[in-house]
Image (cartoon, helix red, strand yellow):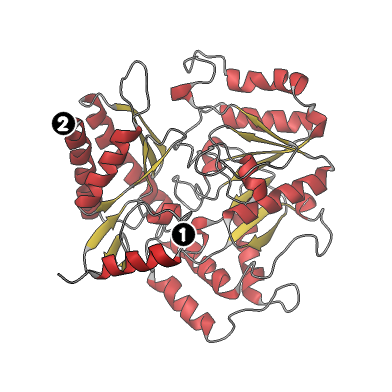
């Protein structure tokens, strides 16, 4: 029997691609549109992971594709530090206008979320003349040298790659379902905030800390949604101590949470904000946006890079932001989230392996456990559910420091019929996995 196209491609991949590049499925995409991926065999899959949050406006949105095609005929590349071009400036203006908070802002562009975080750290250190950076347990900020140090999950991201940079400090996050202090919200007294008084005495003086960086909703860490007091509390600590507050919106940004940026759900104004993923509908681009006096601290040439703010990426981003606003995708995210949360909460009532269902807008996590009392993580069942979903044509992925969270990053252009079909597959897969377990 002749090999399928996928089998042939998989053999080629195994022979040519480094083993460190993991693959959650054996699918090879041929094309995609909206919330549907078609593989090289012609089989269609409903996409509920959106390129890990890259495709909030779906696959190959026509206005973005058209803008890229038109730009490709005019200018593919020009190192902005040598010969400038208007799309870079126009996109910086747009990002400055969108960033939460009053006062003037400025922006720089890079290629990936990790690059944005690296540059945010550089800028914060230069602006404050301090060295220390605080990040949080369950954080994911990237895979580069600096960002691995800021990231919390050891395997597969950090194991075997140390030593890591100095002057990085990690503190517990507000993971209420698995509270570091064995407390229960709301009667906990917010120990995760109270801890800073001890931390600044026992670990490092606040005067040494340049910035605190946090994802408003921790993504890879398990779609952890902090309580209402946490992020405003962190901002208050920063203001009291002269520490800069960096909101890492790489995965949470661009309408995913029901707001343009997730930090807006907590009414917090960051000093610096990092973005990437859904900024340009799949074209590699990231941004660091911040208060002008902070962003202007590094001198000319201190920040930048060869490809940062590529013309194709900039026009793609401009069209993406226009599409988000015109199609009111923040409202759509809330609608998707309300529908999904209602169905998953109903399923939780009759399914004793669902320990927690949490989310903001269309960023939703389902934490699976072996026992509701002990909350023992059920990584094996999570993998089984994902496999069953795939067999029925639905792509979902996992998250969490224990690998036991099913994360839903449904494209915001999903139709009502597609959403219903996908959620039905997910529900059935969870029930089937429990029965077979």
The label number, if any, that marks residue 76 in the structure image: none
Task: Please say if the residues under marks 2 and 1 sit with CB atoms less than 8 Å apart.
Answer: no
Q: If the image is split into quadrants, where does the N terminus sit? A: bottom left
Q: Is residue 269 visible?
A: no
**Point 75% across, 72% down: residue:** 81
Badge 2 marks a residue whose secondary structure is helix
Identify the image quadrant of residue 287: bottom right
Where residue 58 appears, as percent x and y from the top left, is 37, 61
Instruction: For label 2, count other residues whose C-alpha is less than 10 Å away and answer few (under 14), some (14-19) or many (20+).
Output: few
Which residue is tagged 2? 435
Q: If the image is split into quadrants, where does the C terminus sit? A: top left
Where residue 393 appears, as percent x and y from the top left, is 22, 54
Separation (CA) of disc 2 from disc 1: 44 Å
Seen from this angle, which residue lies furthest bottom?
Answer: 73
Residue 165, placed above or below residue 367 = below
Residue 377 appears left or right of 201: left
Q: Nearer the viewer, residue 11 or 419?
A: 11
Residue 88, placed above or below residue 217 = below
Q: Nearer the viewer, mark 2 or mark 1?
A: 2
Which residue is tagged 1? 325
Badge 1 marks a residue whose secondary structure is helix
Residue 81, placed above or below residue 360 = below
Count the marks: how many?
2
Residue 238 appears left or right of 332: right
Instruction: For label 1, count other residues whose C-alpha is less than 10 Å away and answer few (under 14), some (14-19) or many (20+).
Output: some
- Looking at marks 2 and 1 on the same chain, the residue that comes earlier in the sequence is marked by 1
Q: Is residue 82 visible?
A: yes
Identify the image quadrant of residue 57: bottom left
**Point 72% across, 32% down: residue:** 238
Where residue 171 appears, as percent x and y from the top left, is 63, 28
Identify the image quadrant of residue 66: bottom left
């Amino acid at each position: 029997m002749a090999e399928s196209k996928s089998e042939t491609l998989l053999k080629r991949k195994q022979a040519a691609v480094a083993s460190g590049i993991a693959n959650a499925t054996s699918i090879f995409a041929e094309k995609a549109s909206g919330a549907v991926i078609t593989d090289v065999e012609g089989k269609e899959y409903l996409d509920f992971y959106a390129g890990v949050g890259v495709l909030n406006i779906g696959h190959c949105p026509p206005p973005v594709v058209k803008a890229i095609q038109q730009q490709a005929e005019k200018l593919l590349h020009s190192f902005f530090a040598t010969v400038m071009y208007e799309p870079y400036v126009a996109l910086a203006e747009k990002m400055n206008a969108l960033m939460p908070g009053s006062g003037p802002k400025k922006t720089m562009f890079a290629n990936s979320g990790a690059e944005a975080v690296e540059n945010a750290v550089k800028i914060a250190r230069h602006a404050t003349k301090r060295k220390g950076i605080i990040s949080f347990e369950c954080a994911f900020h990237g895979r580069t040298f600096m960002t691995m140090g800021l990231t919390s999950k050891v395997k597969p991201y950090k194991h075997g790659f140390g030593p890591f940079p100095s002057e990085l400090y990690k503190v517990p996050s507000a993971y209420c379902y698995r509270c570091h202090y064995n407390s229960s919200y709301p009667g906990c007294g917010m120990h995760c905030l109270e801890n800073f008084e001890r931390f600044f005495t026992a670990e490092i003086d606040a005067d040494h800390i340049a910035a605190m960086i946090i994802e408003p909703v921790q993504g890879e860490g398990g779609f952890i949604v902090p309580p209402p007091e946490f992020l405003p509390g962190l901002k208050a600590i920063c203001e009291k101590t002269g520490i800069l507050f960096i909101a890492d919106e790489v995965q949470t940004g661009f309408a995913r949470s029901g707001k343009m940026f997730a930090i807006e759900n907590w009414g917090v104004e960051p000093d610096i904000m990092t973005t990437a993923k859904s900024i340009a509908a799949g074209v590699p681009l990231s941004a660091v946006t911040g208060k002008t006096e902070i962003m202007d601290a590094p001198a000319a040439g201190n920040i930048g890079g060869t490809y940062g703010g590529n013309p194709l990426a900039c026009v793609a981003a401009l069209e993406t932001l226009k599409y988000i606003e015109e199609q009111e995708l923040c409202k759509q995210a809330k609608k998707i989230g309300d529908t999904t949360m209602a169905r998953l909460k109903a399923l939780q009532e009759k399914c004793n392996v669902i320990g927690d269902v949490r989310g903001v807008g269309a960023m939703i996590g389902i934490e699976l456990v072996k026992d509701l009392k002990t909350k023992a993580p059920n990584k094996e069942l999570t993998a089984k559910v994902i496999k069953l979903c795939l067999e029925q044509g639905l792509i979902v992925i996992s998250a969490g420091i224990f690998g036991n969270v099913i994360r839903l990053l449904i494209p915001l252009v999903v139709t009502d019929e597609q959403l219903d079909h996908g959620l039905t597959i997910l529900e059935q897969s969870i029930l089937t996995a429990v029965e077979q377990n």
